[in-house]
Image (tube, rainbow, N blue to C red):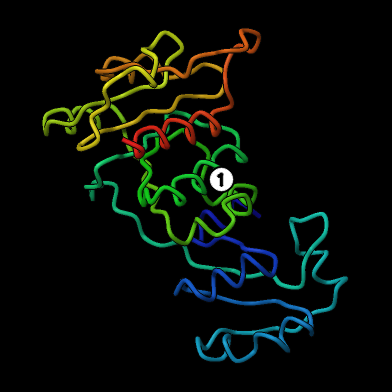
Amino acid sequence: MQKVCDLDGVFVVEGVKMCDEALQSGATIRAICATHPWIEAHADAAQQQEVPLFEITDAELERISNQKTPNQVWMLLSRPTSDEHQLPTAPLTLVLDKIQDPGNMGTIMRTADWFGIRTIVCSRDTVSCYNPKVVQSTMGAIFRTRVIYTDLDAFLAQRRQEGYTVYGALLEGDNVYQTTLVTDKAILVIGNESQGITAAVRDYIDRPVMIPNRGGSCESLNASVATAILCSEFLRR
């Protein structure tokens, strides 16, 4: 299913909340399959967008759903086109280096949305933002967050030439709470869940930062948790 979606440039959204977000976002919806209660409550919104709408039974929804407990509605949407050369211009840019876990990716997108970070730049081997588990865990942030997959080596080299400061989340970095942070033209790199930031990307880091381990027992923080703490600290300044 996922390979077919990749080839056709589409992705799936499921459940009442996510599908409500899709209707409100202005995204291009290819088709809606829903049970009678959802259609009864949302038919007008679907008709306004001239979306093909198919009424299905609960049993049919279970057969097409990726969810353990499907909730009334399944949608097929077009993926927005994303130009990897259209670089973000926000004061803080979030860069993900080889993030693999779909739950982490979705939560990071949701965190970026919370902090008003509208573009995330990813290495090409980062998990797809259209992976079904990623989509669901974004809780709607996928409709408000642009994700660019590109060569991080070229991206970071260009950004440094433009005067950006590159921060990296590293265990051997400076205490983020005691560091003066540049809050304009800043890039924050988050690395792989188990291996951290790759060697090639480390070469571009100007300012390694870390979140102090007060407990002293855990080896590292979850990537999405670390992202939330660091984004909060940057934007607090």
Figure check: 61 above or below 48: above
Q: Residue at x 71, y 72 (%)?
A: 73
Kindly state the secondary structure of the residue where label 1 is placed. helix
The total of numbered circles placed on residues is: 1
Residue 1, image x, y percentages: 66, 55
Figure check: 44 above or below 59: below
Q: Residue at x 23, y 46 (%)?
A: 87
Q: Is residue 137 left or right of residue 129?
A: right
* Relative depth, front residue between 215 and 123: 215
Figure check: 39 above or below 1: below
Figure check: 3 above or below 126: below
Name the residue beneath numbered marker 1. 106
Q: Is residue 210 left or right of residue 200?
A: right
* Relative depth, front residue between 52 and 7: 52
Quarter of the figure with the C terminus: top left
* Relative depth, front residue between 79 and 234: 234
* Amino acid found under the numbered disc labelled 1: Gly
Q: Residue at x 48, y 32 (%)?
A: 229
Q: Residue at x 76, y 56 (%)?
A: 67
Q: Is residue 221 left or right of residue 186?
A: right
Residue 205, image x, y percentages: 28, 19
Residue found at the far right of this picture: 59
